[in-house]
Image (spheres, rainbow, N blue to C red):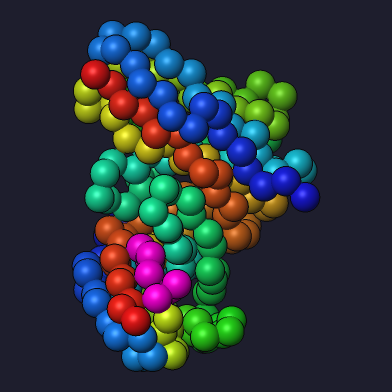
Amino acid sequence: KNEVEQSPQNLTAQEGEFITINCSYSVGISALHWLQQHPGGGIVSLFMLSSGKKKHGRLIATINIQEKHSSLHITASHPRDSAVYICAAADNAGNMLTFGGGTRLMVKP
Amino acid sequence: GAGVSQSPRYKVAKRGQDVALRCDPISGHVSLFWYQQALGQGPEFLTYFQNEAQLDKSGLPSDRFFAERPEGSVSTLKIQRTQQEDSAVYLCASSLGGRRDPYEQYFGPGTRLTVT
């Protein structure tokens, strides 16, 4: 079973700061997902990546397959970025996702 | 088009009652997943369907949990004789690809189940 660890668990930042959330996993995967969850439960998929780097607006996700590590970066953070960010590893046997515990981000104005 | 929908959004059940949670995936999506999310934790896998076939039910916590997707579209997660530890948000997700296809998963809003 894959073990997926995220850090930090909680993060408070000032508006405009550069934010990094880290995710590590223990066994090989087919893809790594980054998800955003707002209060009330709705989950939105931000990225799915299996190599390299992806960028969407102020969000950047990177993955290092050899080191089994991924990072999510938010540039010029804004209070509306406040949410829980979850990484999830899709295993090689199928699409089953193993989730990290989430990083609760609060961006203060 | 419409996303993944789930109903009911909130359910309060007395301990021992049976409940049924419904998921309507995005039309045409082959794969459907159920996850359980306890308060303050990340979701955990329950079961996976490819079309109408339940290919993985390794995450179902007990035989009180049963899921079906008889026509390969709508799915129902049933919990019999609910217990307090079943209180959680139940999330459904669907994706376009089948097994071994790392497609993006689209999540529904979840059903928050509270067992009293």
Would you place residue A36 above or below residue B49 in this image?
A: below
In the image, B40 versus B52, the foreground residue is B40
Is A80 contained in the magenta span? yes
In the rendered image, residue A98, in percent from the top left (x then y), is placed at 37, 54
**Residue drawn 66% across the image and 29% down it:** B74
In the image, A55 versus B64, the foreground residue is A55
Q: Can residue B52 be seen in this view?
A: no
The image shows a total of numbered marks equal to: 0
- The quadrant of the image that shows the C terminus of chain A is bottom left
In the rendered image, residue B21, in percent from the top left (x then y), is placed at 50, 24
Would you place residue B102 above or below residue B2 in this image?
A: below
Is A36 contained in the magenta span? no
In the rendered image, residue A19, in percent from the top left (x then y), is placed at 34, 85
In the image, B97 versus B19, the foreground residue is B19
**Residue drawn 24% across the image and 77% down it:** A12
Q: Can residue B70 be seen in this view?
A: yes
Q: Residue furthest front?
A: A109
Would you place residue B116 above or below residue B112 in this image?
A: above
**Residue drawn 38% across the image and 65% down it:** A83
Q: What stretch is highlighted in magenta?
A: A79-85
Task: Answer with the quarter of the image where residue A23 lies.
Answer: bottom left
**Residue drawn 52% across the image and 27% down it:** B8
Task: Answer with the quarter of the image where residue B58 lies.
Answer: top left
Q: In this view, does A53 lie to the left or right of A104?
A: right
Would you place residue A91 above or below residue A47 in this image?
A: above
In the rendered image, residue A16, in percent from the top left (x then y), is placed at 38, 91
